[in-house]
Image (tube, rainbow, N blue to C red):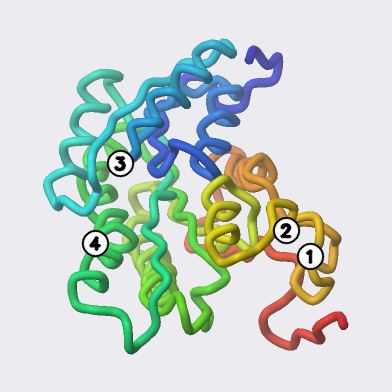
Amino acid sequence: MQNTTQQLSGKIAIVTGAASGVGAGIARRFAAEGARVMLHDVDAAVRETAAAIRDAGGDADAVVSDLADPRVPAELIDAVAKRYGAIHILVNNAALIVRADAETTDVATWDRVMAVNVRAPFLLFKAALPYLRANGGGAVLNIGSMNAYCGQPNMMPYCVSKGALMTLTRNLADGHGRDNIRVNQLNLGWTITENEHRYKLAEGKPEDWAEHLPAEHAPLGRLMTPAEVAHFALSFVVDSACMVSGSVTDLTQHPIIGRNPVK
């Protein structure tokens, strides 16, 4: 995992939702770029992901806990700061995705989605703030979704949470630029992950569904991969991106506004 042009050498990074998919892809790329990475997830498989990164020559470890618990964000931040002595990068990737619409979303589901997808990124930022200030600044990257703009009827609470995350991103960027803390967000389009594959199988799609995508949804012929998302994530947290904050960048194959669907 050694890279002669490592861009994150000496950096301490936290990546949530890193057991698999986009979070794991970002953690792998950051480690390859020289960062010491703490992976977090509610899924104990995150330990295996961290071990695989170490086997590849990277510096990574993992913490398993539930971000729906309001005590966990501060506990995670303090544990990382105590272990490594600093925090430079925070990636809020963890998200709870549920299939529910306005009629089927109950209060408990709504509250848990908002707790993981919106409250936890805020509490993680709040806990990390003194450590980022102590460094003279740092980078926070929130992983959002194109569904933030309107979303799907059967993913209503998730879509609303991602819209809230956009406002949180811009507000924190506006409020903490003076601390040299940059806060940005990537809104992902359709991305192929282990979880997305399982969701589609549960919906009745065939095993090879990703190889037969309608041009309307994948005009470039395939879906984005976690490794490709990680490429963009890196570009927002490196020191050379020091003048970019409060940006919400859409990573998608087609525009939401003014789109002319391919038939």
Question: Where residue 160 sits in the image (x, y, percent)?
Answer: 39, 77
Q: Quarter of the image for the N terminus: give it.
A: top right
- The CA distance from mark 4 to mark 3 is 14 Å
Q: Are marks 3 and 1 in contact (CB under 8 Å)?
A: no
Name the secondary structure under disc 2: helix
Q: Which label's residue is closer to the chain start, 2 or 3?
A: 3
- The three-letter code of the residue at mark 1 reads Leu
2 or 1: mark nearer the eye: 2
Q: Which label's residue is closer to the chain start, 3 or 1?
A: 3
- The CA distance from mark 2 to mark 4 is 32 Å
- The three-letter code of the residue at mark 3 reads Val
Horizontally, residue 207 falls left or right of residue 116, namely right
- The three-letter code of the residue at mark 2 reads Trp
Question: Where residue 68 sits in the image (x, y, percent)?
Answer: 21, 54
4 or 3: mark nearer the eye: 3
Q: Which residue is mark 4?
A: 115
Q: What residue is shown at x 68% (from left), y 85% (from top)?
A: 257
Q: Which residue is mark 3?
A: 42
Q: Which mark is residue 67?
A: none
Q: Which residue is mark 2?
A: 209
Query: For this rendering, which residue is in front, 185 or 93?
Result: 93
- The CA distance from mark 2 to mark 1 is 7 Å
- The CA distance from mark 4 to mark 1 is 33 Å
Q: Residues within 10 Å of mark 1 (few under 14, many from 20)?
A: some
Q: Which label's residue is closer to the chain start, 2 or 4?
A: 4
Q: Which mark is residue 213?
A: 1
2 or 3: mark nearer the eye: 2
Q: Are marks 2 and 1 in contact (CB under 8 Å)?
A: yes
> Which residue of the protein is positioned furthest toward the left in this rendering?
71
Question: Where residue 214 sits in the image (x, y, percent)?
Answer: 80, 71
Q: Quarter of the image for the C terminus: give it.
A: bottom right
